[in-house]
Image (cartoon, rainbow, N blue to C red):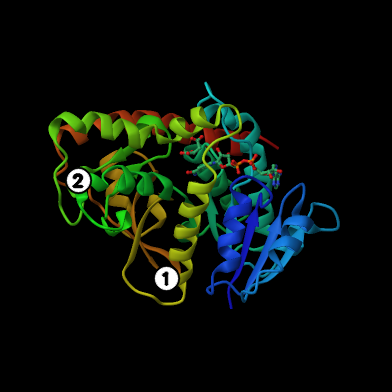
Amino acid sequence: MVKAVVLGASGGIGQPLSLLLKASPLVDELALYDVVNTPGVAADLSHISSVAKITGYLPKDDGLKLALTGADVVVIPAGIPRKPGMTRDDLFKVNAGIVKTLVEGIAQFAPKAFTLVISNPVNSTVPIAAEVLKDAGVFDPKRLFGVTTLDVVRAETFTQEFSGVKNASDATIPVIGGHSGETIVPLFSKVSPSFQIPADRYDALVKRVQFGGDEVVQAKDGAGSATLSMAFAGFRFAEAVIKASKGEKGIVEPTFIYLPGVAGGDEIAKATGVEFFSTPVELGPNGAEKAINILEGVTEQEKKLLEACITGLKGNIEKGVEFAKNSP
Ligand code: NAD
Ligand code: LMR
């Protein structure tokens, strides 16, 4: 039996993500939590003739506790999105506190759940989540994931004309590092099946993957950021975690993890100088079974991308850790 929980379920991502989870035969129970509108969203989804039993909670009457109790997988898309001209780091002020409070709830009511953080800035909200769980004495690094799947989905989509695969997701394109601008590093030299990006298209493609989020923010013109593609990506990652937890083998997805707590992670932490990093991770019954190091043999262009990534990432991680340590 799998209980999935969405924290921030009434939002632009939360609603379509909840729809996908409700429709999935892998989910037996789905609990929706938000500060507004969850009774309505849950009532609407409850008419869908799929297996999952659905409930909706607000903060009143112990809503967070009831939503989280018995959870196997918790996905967090709670928090404000960007408007044009903002960076993801501009969201820190509001979203850091939201994520901290919600993860305190997870530490108390669902300490063994797989926790999937979507809320931005992911490079800082995941370190916040780790600190909160550590503080509560329940941190299992194998169970905490920053969701960077949208970067992978974008890379698959934007390179389809070169990969030649019918379904863009049939190409495996590692995107590593973090989840904002230059911290997002697509490794086109490591794609499988292998294909070439023409030299005159390389820079533009890298930039498009790194700044794909801005493309959507500008097109939405003040109405928010990616929601539908994010729901697709968030569901893809949640489904991967659930399938692996049920024993399916060979599932690998890039995700932003605390390296020292996952097998193989120390080597990547040593090579990069950061403790949190997105890298392909083999998933298993206990979550992140193995962090796969694909840094060997990257091209000179990719080395430069990685240098910029690490510089940005260090600051983002420190900011999250400091916040968690210093806020009451
Ligand atoms: P949204 O404003 O449409 O929805 C956010 C929801 O969070 C709202 O329903 C709001 O009521 C809820 N919320 C606020 N405070 C809460 C709290 N304390 N507890 C529970 N729920 C709370 O925003 P959105 O477009 O769904 O985006 C949500 C977040 O996801 C943003 O931070 C955005 O930047 C991020 N995001 C991340 C990725 C990624 O790749 N990781 C992609 C897209 C968006
Ligand atoms: C994205 O990559 O689309 C998200 O992180 C949302 C954003 O702010 O761009």
* Residue at the disc numbered 1: 244
User: Quadrant of the image for the N terminus?
Assistant: bottom right
Question: What amino acid is labelled 1 in the image?
Answer: Ala
Q: Residues within 10 Å of mark 1 (few under 14, many from 20)?
A: many
Q: Residue at x 62, y 76 (%)?
A: 51
What number of labels is visible?
Answer: 2
Which residue is at the front of the view, 290 or 67?
67
Instruction: Decide if ligand 2 comes within 8 Å of the CB at mark 2.
Output: no
For residue 48, side relative to residue 321 (left or right): right
**In the rendered view, would you say 285 is above or below 290?**
below
Which residue is at the front of the view, 192 or 2?
192
User: Quadrant of the image for the C terminus?
Assistant: top right
**In the rendered view, would you say 25 is above or below 38?**
below
Residue that sits furthest to the right in the current view: 61
Q: Which mark is residue 162?
A: 2
Percent coordinates x, y for residue 296 in the rendering: 17, 47
**In the rendered view, would you say 78 is above or below 91?**
below
One can see residue 113 in this view = no
Q: Residue at x 28, y 34 (%)?
A: 206
Which residue is at the front of the view, 58 or 201?
201
Q: CA distance from mark 2 to mark 1?
A: 30 Å
Question: What amino acid is labelled 2 in the image?
Answer: Phe
